[in-house]
Image: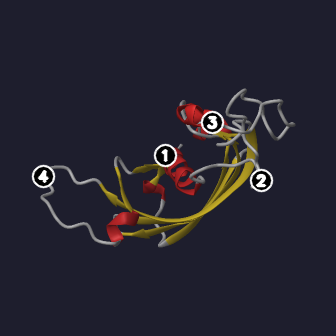
Amino acid sequence: MRLDLTRYRQPTTPFARTFAPEEVTQDGEAYRIVAPVDLHMDVHKDRSRFRLAGTARTELELDCSRCLEPFREPFEASFDQRYVPAVSGPGGEREVSEEDLDTSVYRDDGIDLGEMLREQIYLALPMKPLCREDCAGLCPRCGTNLNAGACGCTTAWEDPRLAPLRTL
């Protein structure tokens, strides 16, 4: 999934492609892609600098942080990423500017679109994915999923260190 930059001669060129989930996914990800990934973007060229601006859409399967059940969530992200050629040799130190935060490097006249898409997905993932806002989670004693029904555990907790005070 490499974007061949030698094919782009115009200042702005539209690009649209649909990728199969297995083309984007890598092992060990915190999510699973369960639908084709639609990528629509404009490739802006300025000499050896490129800017990719567009949107990516798919559907992800995540694990709920409370009940640990898998759930599906639609994914749509807009991006505006700049690319400059990798400099070989010593680059020297310099202060990072605000523009550098949206800038990546490319090598061998190509950009790895899979890496760019995975980065956009990770940036858009919720910090604590929930299957629904009112997810009850798991019982801390028996591990029953409280969304499916109540368990028979007692909810009252007593500190064993304070038990001797009950005799007073």
The alpha-carbon separation of the residues under discs 3 and 1 comes to 61 Å
Q: Where is 113 relative to 8, above or below?
A: above
Looking at the rendering, which quadrant does residue 34 occupy?
top right
Tell me the residue at 23%/54% (across/down): 87
Whether residue 48 is visible here, answered yes or no, is: yes
| Sequence-wise first label, 2 or 4 | 4
- Closest to the camera, between mark 3 and mark 4, is 3
The circle drawn on residue 34 is: none
Q: Inspect the image, locate mark 4, and give the three-letter code of the amino acid beneath it.
A: Pro
Left or right, 106 with respect to 37, comes to left
**Tag 2 residue:** 134
Q: Position of residue 143 (x, y in %)?
A: 72, 29
Q: Pick whichever of labels 4 and 1 is earlier in the sequence.
A: 4
Q: Nearer the viewer, residue 64 or 60?
A: 64
Q: What's the amino acid at mark 1? A: Glu
Residue designated by label 4:
90
Q: Nearer the viewer, residue 47 or 87?
A: 87
